[in-house]
Image (cartoon, helix red, strand yellow):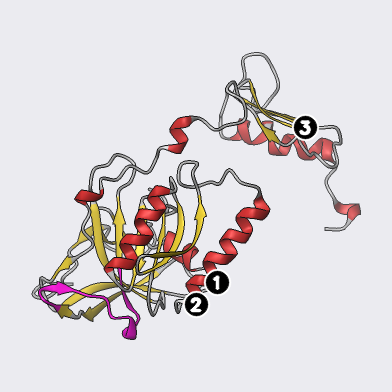
Amino acid sequence: MTASKQLPPILASPLATCKPAAYFTIDDRGTTVAGRRADLIAFSDLRAPRPHLVIRGGKVVARDGELVDERGTTAPRHLRSTVNIDWRRIDFSIPAEGRHARVIGIVPDQLVTEHLVEEIPIVDGEARADPDRDLLKMVVIERHMNSGSTGKGFVRGMGLARGALASTVAHDHHNLAVIGADDVSMRTAARRAAALGGGMVVAEGEAVLAEVPLPLAGLMSDRPIEEVRTQLDRTIELARELGSELHDPFMAMSFLALEVIPSLKLTDHGLVDVDRFEVVPLWVDGTAL
C-alpha cells in the first residue's frame, strides 16, 4: 500500500478496537470509558504505536518492555507447573494386535494428513518402528491432569532415521507428543521435555541433543527472543541431522495431534478419523475401514 492510500491512524484505531467490539456485541471492552474492561496500551507516537505501558484487566502488566505484576517480574507459579506425568504409568510399547495398522501420513507443508494402512514390523509380540520405511512410532501423553491417558500410533513422513523428537506444543490440547525410531530415544526426549516444564527436545538413545525450554504453560519461553531463536534453530538442525527433511519438524508434529483437520490424527484418547469424526482402532485386521 502506498503512503497516499494508507488509512490515517485516527481512523485505523477504532477499526481495531471499538468497531469490532460493537460488531460482535462484546459490550465489556473496546472503548476507554467507565465500566469497560481496561485492556489498554499507552504510547507516544500515533503513527508508531510502540507500547510504553500495557494494562490488562485494569492492572499494569508491562512497563517499558519489561513484564511486571504484583509479585514483580516473574510469571505466576501455576504457569510453571503444567507438565504433570507419573512416568511409572507411561509405557511406550505397542502390543501387536494384528499385522496392519492405521498410519498418519504427513503431507509436507500441509496441515492435512493422509489416512494410510501399512504392515507393521512385529518383534516378540510388540509393534516396532521401521525407520528404513520412514515408519515411526508416535505417542501422545496427557500432561495437564496426570491422568495417564496415552494414545499410540505410527506416522510416515517425519523422516527420522534414528532418535526422537518430543514437544509440549501440540494443538489444541497441547499434550506431550513424541515421535521416534526407538523407545529409548522417545522416553529420553519425553522425560526431558517434562523436566523442562515443557518444551521441544531432540534425543538419540539416552542423550539429549538439543532443546528449547518452554516453562510457561509448556508453550512459551521466559528468555530473550534472540536466545530462543538460537535454541530453535539448533533443534531443527539436529532433527535434520537425524534424518528429517521437513522445513520445521516440530511445527509439523504440533499439528499431528489436532483432531479437527483431516484425515487421521492422534490424541491421548487414540487415533481420530477426522473425516468420520470418531475414534478408531489402531489395528485394521478384520476391521472395516
Residue shown at the point (54%, 33%) measured from the top left: 75
* Residue 133 on the magenta span: yes
Q: Is residue 284 or residue 187 the one in the foreground? A: 187
Quick one: which residue is furthest to the top in this view? 34
Residue 240 in picture, x, y percent from top left: 50, 75
Residue 278 in picture, x, y percent from top left: 23, 57
Q: Earlier in the sequence, mark 3 or mark 1?
A: 3
Residue, disc 1: 237
Tag 2 and tag 1, C-beta contact below 8 Å? yes
Q: Quadrant of the C terminus?
A: bottom left
- As drawn, 69 above or below 275: above
Q: Earlier in the sequence, mark 2 or mark 3?
A: 3
Which of the 4 image quarters holds residue 262? Answer: bottom left
**Alpha-carbon span between mark 3 and mark 1:** 37 Å
- As drawn, 164 above or below 7: below
> Which span of residues is magenta-colored?
123-137
Residue shown at the point (83%, 35%) measured from the top left: 10
Residue 160 in picture, x, y percent from top left: 40, 76
Residue shown at the point (46%, 57%) measured from the top left: 200
Tag 2 and tag 3, C-beta contact below 8 Å? no
Q: Which amino acid type is marked by label 1?
A: Glu
Residue shown at the point (39%, 40%) measured from the top left: 82
Residue, disc 3: 52
Q: Is residue 155 or residue 198 the one in the foreground? A: 198
Which of the 4 image quarters holds residue 105? Answer: bottom left
Q: Which amino acid type is marked by label 2?
A: Glu
On residue 241, the disc is 2
Secondary element under disc 1, as helix, strand or loop, is helix
